[in-house]
Image (tube, grey):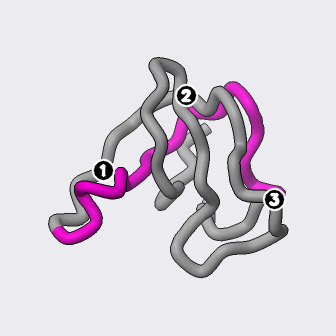
Amino acid sequence: MDGTIRGNIRQGKKVKVVQKQDQRSGELTEGVVLKILTNSATHPHGIKVMLEGGLVGRVKEVLG
């Protein structure tokens, strides 16, 4: 599913995100959404979320 649409992302869903320091390399980190940080309905680079464990990144893939 598309990570640029806020409606696709829910608390507790498993996602792959790119963290700020990994934007150049494109390295993805997998985790479970704790909190959605982006307020707008869409964002071209991905919705910003906080994962369980405190990592913050923009969603590139919604897994489940």
Q: Residues within 10 Å of mark 1 (few under 14, many from 20)?
A: some
Residue 22 image point, x, y percent: 24, 57
The residue identified by callout 2 is 32
The answer to whether residue 61 is magenta is no
The residue identified by callout 1 is 28
Amino acid found under the numbered disc labelled 1: Leu
Spatial distance from mark 2 to mark 3, Cα to Cα?
19 Å
Residue 62 against residue 42 in the figure, above or below: above
Q: Residue at x 69, y 34 (%)?
A: 35
To which quarter of the image does residue 30 belong?
A: top left
Amino acid found under the numbered disc labelled 2: Val
Q: Residue at x 52, y 42 (%)?
A: 15
Which span is picked out in magenta?
7-24
To which quarter of the image does residue 63 belong?
A: top right
Q: Secondary structure at mark 1?
A: strand
Residue 50 against residue 27 in the figure, above or below: above
Residue 44 image point, x, y percent: 59, 80
Q: Residues within 10 Å of mark 3 (few under 14, many from 20)?
A: few
User: Label for residue 39?
Assistant: 3
